[in-house]
Image (tube, rainbow, N blue to C red):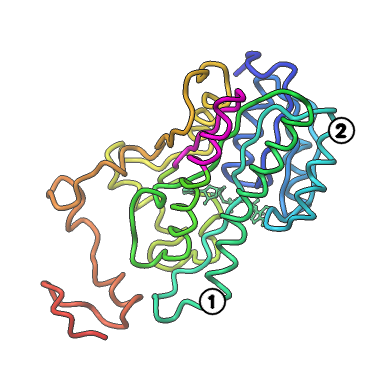
């Protein structure tokens, strides 16, 4: 892919060391952006920055940390003098712990990275745009879990629903001053997001199998998501703001109570056993507590 939609632009990508952030950094760089690759994993950030075709710097920073946010912002300006585009993407899934087992620490850490992290990134972006006297564009990574619910992803989906609140508030604030804010909502993209729960039902190892039940019958790729992110950051999306764009193979529009919607395609007893310690009988008679 060659092209110059981002020629002369500077882009910050958080969570750029792996997965979707890495894919986004690559696409933006291929289209001419100079890239600031932010990641809590310094080696991963450096690896991404080194493999990009254009100019790039790596910054090790925890997006949940206010001081670290100021550090990546300062590093971006020190390297390239300004910032025009942001992909606020870093996120963690936390745990599949059943609700009664979910600890306050696990819940809070997920909100800190996914919600506070995107808030701090948005605030840094708007401060930067104000300081340099000009707008730009921002994309947040949302999720199919911003739009739908699962019994085993409480902390994560709470955080990803909050992304929509951040999205709408920031888009409405930014509109009159020429700043567009949108979100991309991926479905299943096999990355390391669920690596900590690789062998658990709903974890990394069964992503391809679950993806085979989506309308497009395949998992997404980081390049699929990067293409949407790049579109939303580009002038091709000049009249789009405040939107959440699903890139999920159609998963979020499935009617799950129709046979064609995947109902019955997944053996529920596997999930029931993980959540309740036993299979729930058909009809869900509430006998498990
Ligand atoms: N992969 C999917 O199927 C999927 C689906 C929907 C949404 N998402 C979202 O996409 C985003 C990226 O996830 P991914 O799939 O690429 O996961 P990933 O684990 O492959 O990559 C995430 C990157 O973020 C970094 N990171 C984690 N915590 C950080 C922190 N506190 N500060 C800075 N960097 C941090 C990690 O080191 C890693 O490099 C997340 O927001 C995730 O919720 C992913």
Element type where label 1 sits in the image? helix
Position of 123 with respect to 75 (left or right) is left
Q: Earlier in the sequence, mark 2 or mark 1?
A: 2
Is 192 drawn above or below residue 13 in the view shown? below
Estimate the x, y position of residue 117 in percent, counting from the top left: 64, 53
Residue highlighted by disc 2: 79
- Quarter of the image containing the C terminus? bottom left
Element type where label 2 sits in the image? helix
Residue highlighted by disc 1: 104
Position of 83 with respect to 74 (left or right) is left
* Residue at the (24%, 59%) spot, across then down: 266
* Residue at the (78%, 53%) spot, across then down: 68
Crowding near the residue tagged with mark 2, few <14, some 14–19, many ≥20 C-alpha atoms within 10 Å: some
Estimate the x, y position of residue 19 in percent, counting from the top left: 58, 45
Is 24 drawn above or below residue 45 in the view shown? above
- Quarter of the image containing the N terminus? top right
Closer-to-camera residue (254/107)? 107
Q: Which residues are magenta?
A: 167-185
* Residue at the (61%, 48%) spot, across then down: 118
Q: Quadrant of residue 26?
A: top right
Position of 163 with respect to 81 (left or right) is left
Crowding near the residue tagged with mark 1, few <14, some 14–19, many ≥20 C-alpha atoms within 10 Å: few
Residue 150: mark = none
Estimate the x, y position of residue 154 in percent, counting from the top left: 42, 65
Q: CA distance from mark 2 to mark 1?
A: 39 Å
Q: Give the foreground label among 2 and 1.
A: 1
Estimate the x, y position of residue 89 in percent, counting from the top left: 59, 44
Is 255 drawn above or below residue 224 in the view shown? below
Is 132 drawn above or below residue 145 in the view shown? above
């Amino acid at each position: 892919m060659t092209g110059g939609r981002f020629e002369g632009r500077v882009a910050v990508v958080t969570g750029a060391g792996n997965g979707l952030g890495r894919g986004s950094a690559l696409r933006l760089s291929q289209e001419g952006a100079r890239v600031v690759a932010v990641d809590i994993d310094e080696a991963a950030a450096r690896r991404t920055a080194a493999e990009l075709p254009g100019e790039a710097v790596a910054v090790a920073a925890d997006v949940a940390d206010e001081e670290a946010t100021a550090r990546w912002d300062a590093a971006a300006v020190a390297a390239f003098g300004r910032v025009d585009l942001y992909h606020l993407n870093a996120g963690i899934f936390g745990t599949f712990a059943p609700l009664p087992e979910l600890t306050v620490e696990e819940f809070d850490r997920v909100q800190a990275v996914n919600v506070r992290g995107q808030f701090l990134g948005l605030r840094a972006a708007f401060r930067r745009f104000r300081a340099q006297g000009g707008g730009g564009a921002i994309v947040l990574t949302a999720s199919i879990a911003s739009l739908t619910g699962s019994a085993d992803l409480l902390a994560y989906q709470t955080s990803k629903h909050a992304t929509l609140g951040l999205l709408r508030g920031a888009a409405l604030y930014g509109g009159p001053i020429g700043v567009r804010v949108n979100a991309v909502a991926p479905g299943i993209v096999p990355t390391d997001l669920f690596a900590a729960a690789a062998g658990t039902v709903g974890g990394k190892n069964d992503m391809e199998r679950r993806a085979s039940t989506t309308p497009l019958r395949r998992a997404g790729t980081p390049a699929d998501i990067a293409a949407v992110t790049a579109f939303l950051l580009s002038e091709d999306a000049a009249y789009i703001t405040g939107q959440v764009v699903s890139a999920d193979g159609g998963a979020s529009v499935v009617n799950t109570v129709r046979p064609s919607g995947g109902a019955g395609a997944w053996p529920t007893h596997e999930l029931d056993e993980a959540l309740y310690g036993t299979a729930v009988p058909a009809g869900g008679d509430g006998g498990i507590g």
